[in-house]
Image (cartoon, rainbow, N blue to C red):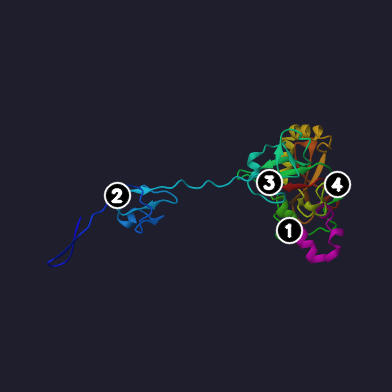
Amino acid sequence: MRVILSAGKKVYFTLLASSFMFPVSAFAQCVENENCAALGYDSTTSCDNGIKCPFGEYWACREPAKPEEPEAAVLGQCNGYAKNCNIADILYSDGTCSADVVSSKTPIAVVVYISRDGCGQALALEELGNFIWSTEQVDIPDLPDYSSAPTNDFDSCENTKIVIDYSSKQYGNKASGYYHAFWWVYNYAPSTMPETKGKWCLPAGGILNSIYQNSYDINQSLIRLNKEAVGSAYWSSSEYLNNDAWYWQANTISFFINITNKISKYNVRPVIEF
């Protein structure tokens, strides 16, 4: 190649042929993640983490790093691991799930719901007892009201948090005496996993519906673990209005407004997100 620096003076130098081999990501002119057309190049091919070099229509693509799959669930929050599980799988204390009983692991719940984005909820292996929803008949601020069966309410833990926060603000350290079902769930933790206290939730209507729809398989897993099968009626965390909340009764195939309102007693069985 010949370069003219000024009139009458010439400097010659040679570029090795290997300099034009692609990709030439070591060249300073290469820029990352730029749009071809915006830079005036004819190529429309682009890729994540690519390198464009200004020596023709070329985009050198580096293999994009694949996101790491979580090796286990994080109990009490969603990290997407539940997409590796199935409803009726056993959830273990190490955050893994399996259709089989694994004798070397500690079971803490049975999977009852998995969202499209891989967030799951699992049902505790035991019932806590019969409790009232609340002693007062008020429409709780921020808690959605459902005028028909809340089969699309899957926000068990958000509902629970709203009620816990509301009752704490209203009644301080006496709050558990007003919202029994929620506080029993909030204070629950299996003896094998005391660190999960505060992470369990009162199931939302949609979760109870999923339990009903999959009750046979869920009960088979509970039976294999020698634990309590799904009971006949459970409180949900879904509210109707100031007087009433929703509960699920197994032999009705549906949800019904609690005709004796929130002061009625029904079984409480927590779920945990994972």
Disc 3 is placed on an element classified as loop
Cα separation, mark 4 vs mark 2, equals 73 Å
For the residues carrying marks 1 and 4, which lies nearer the camera in this image? 4
- Camera-nearest label, 3 or 1: 3
Q: In the depicted view, which residue is nearer to us: 24 or 165? A: 24
Q: Which residue has dot 4 on it?
A: 128
* Residue 239 x, y percent position in the rendering: 74, 52
Q: Mark 2: which secondary structure?
A: helix
Circles 4 and 2 in contact, beta carbons < 8 Å: no
Magenta-colored stretch includes residue 184: yes
Separation (CA) of disc 1 from disc 4: 21 Å
Tell me which residue sits at (46%, 45%) in the image.
63
Circles 2, 1 touching at the beta carbon (< 8 Å) = no
Residue that carries the numbered disc 3 in the rendered image = 73
Q: What is the total number of numbered labels drawn onto the structure image? A: 4
Q: Relative to residue 126, is residue 162 drawn left or right?
A: left
Residue 95 picture quarter: top right
Label 1 crowd bin: few (<14), some (14–19), many (20+), radius 10 Å: some
Viewer-nearest of discs 4 and 3: 3
Query: Which amino acid type is shown beneath numbered disc 4?
Result: Leu
Is 240 in front, or is 51? 51
Q: Left of 266 or right of it: where is 68? A: left
Q: Which residue is mark 1?
A: 162
Please say whether residue 265 is one of the residues in the magenta stretch. no
State how far apart marks 3 and 1 are (Cα).
24 Å
Q: Are marks 3 and 2 in contact (CB under 8 Å)?
A: no
What amino acid type should be assigned to the residue bearing mark 3? Answer: Ala
Quick one: label 4 or label 3, which is nearer the N terminus? 3
Q: List the residue tagged with mark 2.
A: 20
For marks 3 and 1, the one nearer the N-term is 3
Question: Relative to the observer, which residue lies in front, 24 or 266?
Answer: 24
Amino acid carrying label 1: it is Ile
